[in-house]
Image (cartoon, helix red, strand yellow):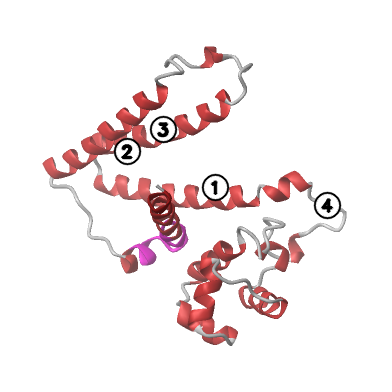
């Protein structure tokens, strides 16, 4: 179908708090088939595309990643056609939504633990990750002004990666030393974070899938 369809229908189901078994029954397909659709293993036909759009009350364009607006009623009649470049960035917008919602959950949990040192270590870790990605994009054009950065271009990846390792080790040490922890489970997270939990669960699955794929390729 496309690169985002399977992820969007998974997010929509989890946002509604519907089990895969229930969604499959409502849509008139087997759970195994719906699982294949959600994992991107199989492509659905137009009939199923129409049914699932009605089921989640969204447009087929939204399911196909052609717009970030969920329903046709959100369109203004005079709205110009979305530029092709914007349409191709829908996958990035889905990822951004996952990251933002997941970050909200993480920082809420950090706030509940109430440790400034823990929050600082976690914040430094995430900032270094963003720094690495941004600098990689910035450095792709040799003519870009390097004065924006103070870390040497040949060593910044090693330095920031080392800093991230130190930060995550520090976070674990702080929690062990302060006997700080939270009792968590998928059910608890779903109940407390009605909107953020589905994104967090999806991010976990995508991250682990990516890691496992790289291990296989290596």
Kindly identify the residue that appears in the image at 22 percent across and 37 percent down: 169
Numbered range of the magenta stretch: 189-201
- The residue that mark 4 highlights is 81
Tell me which label, 1 or 4, sits earlier in the chain.
4
**Horizontal arrangement in the rendering, residue 170 relative to residue 213 (left or right):** left
**Horizontal arrangement in the rendering, residue 45 relative to residue 150 (left or right):** right
> In which quadrant will I find the N terminus?
bottom right
Task: Give me the disc on residue 96.
Answer: 1
Tell me which label, 4 or 2, sits earlier in the chain.
4
Counting from the top left corner in percent of width and height, residue 186 is at: 33, 66
| Near-viewer residue (137 or 108) | 137
- The residue that mark 3 highlights is 127
Residue 93, placed above or below residue 168: below
Crowding at dot 3, Cα within 10 Å, few <14 / some 14-19 / many 20+, comes out as few
Task: Give me the disc on residue 208.
Answer: none
- The residue that mark 2 highlights is 122
């Amino acid at each position: 179908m496309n690169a985002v369809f399977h992820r969007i229908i998974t997010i929509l189901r989890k946002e509604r708090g519907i089990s895969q078994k229930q969604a499959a029954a409502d849509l008139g397909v087997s759970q195994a088939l719906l699982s294949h659709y959600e994992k991107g293993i199989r492509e659905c036909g137009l009939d199923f595309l129409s049914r699932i759009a009605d089921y989640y009350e969204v447009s087929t364009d939204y399911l196909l990643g052609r717009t970030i607006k969920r329903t046709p009623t959100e369109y203004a009649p005079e709205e110009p056609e979305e530029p092709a470049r914007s349409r191709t960035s829908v996958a990035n917008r889905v990822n951004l939504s996952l990251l933002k919602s997941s970050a909200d959950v993480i920082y809420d949990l950090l706030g509940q633990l109430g440790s400034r040192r823990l929050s600082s270590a976690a914040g430094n870790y995430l900032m270094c990750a963003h720094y690495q990605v941004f600098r990689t994009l910035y450095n792709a054009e040799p003519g870009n002004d390097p004065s924006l950065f103070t870390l040497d271009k040949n060593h910044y990846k090693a330095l920031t990666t080392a800093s991230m390792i130190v930060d995550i080790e520090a976070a674990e040490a702080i929690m062990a030393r302060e006997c700080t922890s939270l009792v968590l489970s998928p059910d608890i997270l779903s109940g407390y974070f009605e909107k953020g939990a589905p994104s967090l669960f999806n991010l976990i699955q995508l991250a682990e899938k990516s890691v496992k794929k790289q291990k296989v390729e290596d």
